[in-house]
Image (tube, coloured by chain):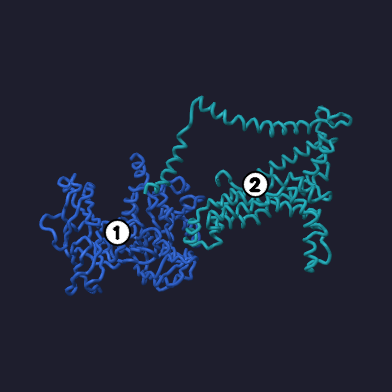
């Protein structure tokens, strides 16, 4: 803890964006159309990604490692060449442009600062490359360093800074070049947990003040939910779902999203009845789950996957066999302060239930007992497999 | 997430090192204990011979004495050398050879080291290719040198035959064998690894994502190379240059074998004076001047770059 308090002290004031760095005129935004990357040897890293991002929007590409999110980001930045597909920014195709010709800049995962240059020279680098004169460079670098609260450390080498400070230098270094889109590759991955939480707020605040397009890659669900305007969940080279954080968290469309976001109970079963848009699914454990799914192609007898969020479940007394409820055995009662996570089994299925922390008193030590879990029909999601 | 705090701990350690001093008499004695063998070795093999050579260079040449000199003090050896134009011509020629070797090794070695360190993606191939690049070291110096002389570079050698067959030259080029040119060519081949190795190790430390960051910030390939790669390669350039300068300036083996009797250098002069034995004090004086020239050369090279800062 001592280290963390020092860290906190060192990191200095919150980031505040100067007006000179705010986004200028906006255009059509960024479009990825049918973007595909196949590496030599046949590995398809990214397959048919379609995405539109507006200026001023904070988009997070989220997925497990190897899902293609970083490769997608690298193609936007020009560090990978797409096998097929199109990337346009404000109507201009980027595909044939070298990284230095693109109006995008990247914050790399491990900051990628130039070790042989001082902090100030790092920040000035982009301006120097764009032919900005010495005086002007110095002035803008000072502004950018002030923005991230490091104006007093300009003459130090990056190795003499803490991880959080290096992160700030990396941000200042890219923002002085006034990119149209800022690409961030796991920008918080190298920071300790407390600093991560703080930088989430600061980064998002900074983006709001700048009004700039941010595209942020992470494998951290919580980070994505807390920061994004929209989340693009990817798996196995493909986009699984694109939606705002609330929708991603509460209405997953595919089994993968439901499982990857965590805390979703996924039931496998068969469609046992269909009345209009209301579909009843009989699960392997013998429960019946109903949901209203307009436009779903499912017919009676088809296999079906449904999910219910752990937080949308409740514990119930009363008779068994009621629709949208299931009898379970308690495997483990996990107390997390604000809430209690109940780990349950029902036949072969594993379930997770989240209830408020004050319920711990009545749940403590009840492992092995039977309990009934119920939920509302509107909290059930029919998933694409 | 626990592994992600590395940058913090690194900087924390840097701070610690400044504060923590291993104090106390015991610590000093342990340090002394570790240092003693090294100092003894340096004293016996470097300092003592140097001191001896300097002493002899101020002693008087005397025919008929078994050692070839008496211990009467004189500066005549140096006076003779300063007036000896052959010695200075050789000094100049050796110096030129060294400069050419340093520059040529840098020009030809840099691309090799750059390719190995930054273009070869897999660490496995990187190490394999590096060991392959070291292959010339696997064969003995003498074998390579002898192969150079008659079979490869000689008047009837392979290179001349190819040149003649291709019609590039009308008759075999004499300069290829036993000439200053052939000595200089051989030096580059023999010593280039002393440039490639340090360059490889410094370039392998270059963060590839920093190169991408430079591209991202508006630097084209050339500017990225000039602004990011070269500054980080400088310690390797300096170390390689010192190696090659020192090794080639004092060279006499290569000069003898490749150059035959037609080429001489400071090294061969010192060696002949000492070997023949009668001119030991003057040989010592020539050697002392050579060492002085080497020290001056290294001083100049290190002055060109701020080595301590770079490393």
Structural distance between the alpha carbons of marks 2 and 1: 59 Å
The chain letter for the residue carrying disc 2 is: B
The image quadrant where one finds the C terminus of chain A is bottom left
Q: Residues within 10 Å of mark 2 (few under 14, many from 20)?
A: some
Q: Chain of mark 1?
A: A
Which residue shows up at 80% across the image and 41% down it? B271
Q: Is residue B79 above or below residue A353?
A: above
* Callouts 2 and 1 in the same chain: no
> Element at badge 2?
helix
Q: In the depicted view, which residue is nearer to us: A361 or B288?
A: A361
Q: Residue furthest left?
A: A318
Residue A11 vertical placement versus B157 (above, below): above
- Residue B151, located in which quarter of the rendered image? bottom right
Closer-to-camera residue (B150/B57): B150
Residue A140 appears in the figure = no
Residue B168 on image: x %, y %: 78, 67
Q: Nearer the viewer, residue B205 or A116?
A: B205
Residue furthest to the top in view is: B25
Q: Which chain is blue?
A: A
From the top left corner, tell me how far across and down residue B132 is, in percent: 63, 54
Seen in the image, is B22 located left or right of residue A168?
right
Q: Quadrant of the N terminus of chain A?
A: top left
| Residue matched to label 1 | A261
Q: Residues within 10 Å of mark 1 (few under 14, many from 20)?
A: many
Residue B88, label in figure: none
Of badges 2 and 1, the one in the foreground is: 1
Dot 1 lies on which element? Answer: loop
Q: Which chain is cyan?
A: B
Q: Quadrant of residue A46?
A: bottom left
Say if mark 2 contacts mark 1, CB within 8 Å.
Answer: no
- Whole-percent x and y of residue B307? 58, 45
Identify the residue under disc 2: B301
């Amino acid at each position: 803890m001592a280290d963390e308090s020092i860290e906190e002290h060192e990191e200095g004031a919150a980031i505040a964006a100067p007006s000179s760095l705010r986004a200028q005129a906006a255009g059509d935004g960024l479009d990825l159309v049918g973007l595909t990357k196949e590496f030599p040897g046949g590995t398809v890293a990214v397959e048919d990604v379609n995405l539109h991002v507006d200026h001023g929007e904070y988009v997070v590409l989220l997925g497990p490692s190897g899902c293609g999110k970083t490769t997608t980001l690298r193609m936007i930045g020009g560090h990978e060449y797409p096998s097929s597909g199109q990337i346009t920014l404000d109507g201009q195709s980027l595909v044939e442009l070298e990284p230095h010709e693109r109006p995008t800049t990247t914050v790399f995962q491990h900051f990628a600062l130039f070790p042989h240059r001082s902090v100030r020279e790092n920040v000035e680098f982009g301006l120097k490359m764009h032919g900005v004169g010495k005086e002007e460079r110095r002035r803008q670098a000072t502004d950018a360093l002030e923005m991230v609260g490091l104006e007093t450390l300009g003459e130090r080498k990056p190795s003499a800074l803490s991880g959080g400070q290096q992160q700030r230098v990396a941000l200042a270094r890219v923002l002085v070049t006034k990119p149209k889109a800022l690409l961030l590759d796991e920008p918080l991955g190298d920071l300790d947990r407390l600093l991560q939480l703080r930088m989430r707020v600061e980064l998002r605040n900074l983006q709001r003040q700048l009004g700039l397009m941010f595209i942020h890659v992470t494998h951290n669900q919580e980070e994505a939910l807390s920061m994004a305007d929209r989340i693009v969940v990817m798996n196995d080279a493909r986009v699984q779902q694109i939606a705002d954080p609330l929708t991603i968290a509460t209405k997953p469309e595919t089994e993968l999203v439901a499982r990857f976001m965590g805390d979703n109970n996924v039931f496998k079963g068969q469609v046992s009845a269909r009345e209009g848009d209301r579909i009843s699914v009989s699960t392997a454990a013998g429960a019946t789950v109903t949901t209203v799914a307009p436009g779903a192609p499912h017919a009676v007898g088809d296999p079906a996957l449904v999910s219910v969020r752990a937080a949308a479940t409740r514990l119930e007394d009363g008779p068994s066999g009621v629709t949208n409820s299931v009898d379970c055995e308690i495997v483990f009662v996990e107390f997390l302060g604000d809430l209690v996570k109940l780990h349950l089994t029902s036949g072969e299925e594993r379930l997770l239930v989240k209830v408020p922390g004050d319920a711990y008193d009545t749940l403590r030590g009840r492992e092995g007992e039977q309990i009934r879990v119920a939920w509302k029909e509107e909290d059930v999601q029919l998933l694409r497999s | 997430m626990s592994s992600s705090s590395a940058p913090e701990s690194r900087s924390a350690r840097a701070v610690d090192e400044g504060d923590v001093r291993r104090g106390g008499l015991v610590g000093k004695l342990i340090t002394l204990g570790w240092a003693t063998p090294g100092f003894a070795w340096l004293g016996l093999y470097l300092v003592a011979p140097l001191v001896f050579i300097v002493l002899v260079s101020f002693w008087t040449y005397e025919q008929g004495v078994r050692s070839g000199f008496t211990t009467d003090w004189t500066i005549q050896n140096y006076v003779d050398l300063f007036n000896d134009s052959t010695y200075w011509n050789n000094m100049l020629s050796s110096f030129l050879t060294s400069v050419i070797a340093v520059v040529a090794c840098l020009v030809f070695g840099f691309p090799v080291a750059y390719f190995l360190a930054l273009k070869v993606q897999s660490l496995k191939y990187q190490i394999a290719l590096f060991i392959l690049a070291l292959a010339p070291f696997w064969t003995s110096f003498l074998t390579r040198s002898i192969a150079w002389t008659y079979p490869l570079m000689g008047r009837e050698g392979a290179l001349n035959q190819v040149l003649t067959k291709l019609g590039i030259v009308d008759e075999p080029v004499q300069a290829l064998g036993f000439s200053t040119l052939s000595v200089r060519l051989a030096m580059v081949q023999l010593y280039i690894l002393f440039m490639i190795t340090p360059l490889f190790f410094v370039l392998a430390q270059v963060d590839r994502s920093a190169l991408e960051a430079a591209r991202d910030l508006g630097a084209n390939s050339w500017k990225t190379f000039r602004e990011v790669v070269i500054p980080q390669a400088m310690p390797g350039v300096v170390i390689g240059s010192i190696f090659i300068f020192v090794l080639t300036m004092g060279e006499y083996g290569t000069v003898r074998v490749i150059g035959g009797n037609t080429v001489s250098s400071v090294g061969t002069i010192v060696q002949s004076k000492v070997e023949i034995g009668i001119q030991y004090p003057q040989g010592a004086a020539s050697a002392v001047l050579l060492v002085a020239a080497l020290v001056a050369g290294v001083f100049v090279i290190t002055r060109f770059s701020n080595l301590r800062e770079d490393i």
